Amino acid sequence: MDWEHVVMVSKQELAEGIRFAGRRAAAAAERTKDWDYRLGHRWTSGDAYRHIAAVAGGAARLYPLLDAGVLSSVTVEQAAQNNAASIAALAGKSREEVIAAILEGHEASARFVETLDEADLATVVKLGGYEMEKAEIIAQIWIHHSIAHAYEASARWPIL
């Protein structure tokens, strides 16, 4: 494949994708019967949805940090601690409140992305193992990440 012809996600596609990911994660959360189901690691299905909800509205907070280099110094242990704290902060929320936070947060992040400059979104930055345009990092976090956790939390294979 000629990678030079792989087009970066546009600002509009990014905003639409964030909204789509939020709706898909909310739909999975609504349909997952057992939120106490233990996943392949320490989290439950409910923990995964709480994590999505905690991250959902964070694009405006994270985006400026992409230029600052701050995020590259975050260790895996620190990220795990932050995730645990954000999940615990939502532990008392009802399923409906978590689903609302997923939808509202993704909408807030999509609206923020719509305010960004396309040229700035095209700026390549290094972040941990990533070296890509800011738009692609935002897509990783607010589209792929949300859908991946929603799938993990809701999938009960094999489907018979």
Image (cartoon, helix red, strand yellow):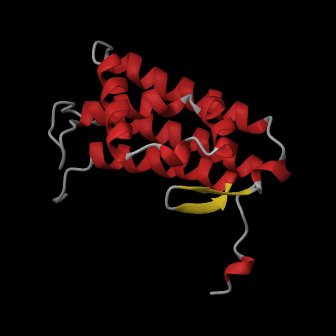
Q: In this view, does 25 lie above or below 108?
A: below
Q: What's the residue at 60%, 52% (across, down)?
A: 137
Asked whether residue 90 is in view, the answer is no
Q: Where is residue 139 in the image (x, y as percent from the top left)?
A: 59, 51
Q: Is residue 83 left or right of residue 100?
A: left
Query: Quadrant of the rendered structure where residue 86 is?
Result: top left
* Viewer-nearest residue: 12 or 156: 12
Total numbered badges shown on the rendered structure: 0
Q: Is residue 8 above or below residue 102?
A: below
- Place of residue 25 in the rendered image (x, y in percent of width and height, measured from the top left): 43, 39
Q: In this view, does 135 lie to the left or right of 28?
A: right
Quadrant location of the C terminus?
bottom left
Looking at the picture, how far across and down is residue 34, in whole percent?
Answer: 18, 33
Q: In this view, does 127 lie above or below 36?
A: below
Q: To which quarter of the image does residue 44 belong?
A: top left
Quarter of the rendering occupied by the N terminus: bottom right
- Give the residue at x 60% y 42%: 18
Give the camera-side residue of 98 and 69: 69
Tell me where residue 47 appears, x and y as whole percent: 28, 31
Does residue 109 sit above or below 141 in this rendering?
Answer: above
Q: Say which of 48 and 33 sits in front.
A: 48
Extreme-top residue of the structure: 92
Q: Which residue is drawn at 74% across and 78% down?
A: 5
- Displayed quadrant of residue 63: top right
Say which residue appears at 62% left-offset and 34% top-offset. Answer: 59
114 left or right of 28? Answer: right
Identify the residue at the far bottom of this view: 1
Residue 64 in view here: yes
